[in-house]
Each structure stands twice: as structure tokens, then as C-alpha cells.
Image (cartoon, grey):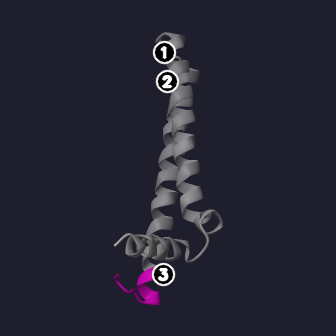
Amino acid sequence: MKTTTPLERAHNRIECIRSFYTHLFAYAGLNIVLLIMWGLDFNIADIFWERTFFITAGLGGLAVLTHAIILFWHNYLLPKGWDERMIKKILSKTKKKI
């Protein structure tokens, strides 16, 4: 297992947060462009734009929400030390079988 310093962990955390905000702004920007095009109605069938907008907004929103949950709430979903406890549990079961 690779050990990391607090500075490396902080740097990784900042990169993850930066990635989330990039994702969020790209999602918002794309939806703004789609709303403008939908509002101006460039003589394109309404059904196409409605489906495109709602699919893009829905799936993109779900992706941004998932990204936020993984980034900000992962400690609540999987408490600290959970992965190490699971590794020990699996190793102890493996040793019993041997």
C-alpha cells in the first residue's frame, strides 16, 4: 500500500474538487446553450430539441450529482477505515480456507 503525505492528499483533494467544478460548469454551459437554441428555435423540429434537452439535462444532472456525492459525501456513505476493515475480513476468510 502506498503511503502519502498530508500535502499529497491535500493536492489530490484539490484536484478532485477542481474536476468537479469543471464538470459542473460544463454541464451548466451546455444546458444554457441548449436552452438558448431551444428558445430561438432554429427551425428544427420541436420534438428533437425537447428530447435532446431533457435527456442531456437529466443524464448530465445525474452525472454531476453522482460526482458530488462521490466527492463530498463519500465519508458518510463509506465510513473512514471501511476499506481496510473489508480487506482484513477477506484476508481472514481466505486464511481460514487455507
Residue 39, quarter of picture: top right
Q: Nearer the viewer, mark 1 or mark 3?
A: 3
Question: How many angstroms separate mark 2 from mark 3 (CA)?
Answer: 39 Å
In the rendered image, the quadrant that contains the N terminus is bottom left
How many residues crowd around disc 3 within 10 Å: few (fewer than 14), some, or many (20 or more)? few
Q: Which residues are magenta?
A: 1-9
The disc labelled 1 sits on which kind of residue? Answer: Phe
Q: Is residue 44 visible?
A: yes
Whether the residues at callouts 1 and 3 have beta carbons within 8 Å, the answer is no
Residue 48's label in the rendered image is 1
How many residues crowd around disc 2 within 10 Å: few (fewer than 14), some, or many (20 or more)? some
Whether the residues at callouts 1 and 2 have beta carbons within 8 Å, the answer is yes
Up/down of 42 relative to 66, above or below: above
Residue under the point 55% across and 19% down = 50
Task: Please tell me which residue lies in front, 5 or 21.
Answer: 5
- Please give the count of numbered marks on the rendered protein: 3
Q: Which residue is mark 3?
A: 10
Of helix, strand and loop, which one carries label 2? helix
The disc labelled 2 sits on which kind of residue? Answer: Thr
The disc labelled 3 sits on which kind of residue? Answer: Ala
Q: Which residue is mark 2?
A: 52
Q: Is residue 66 left or right of residue 97?
A: right
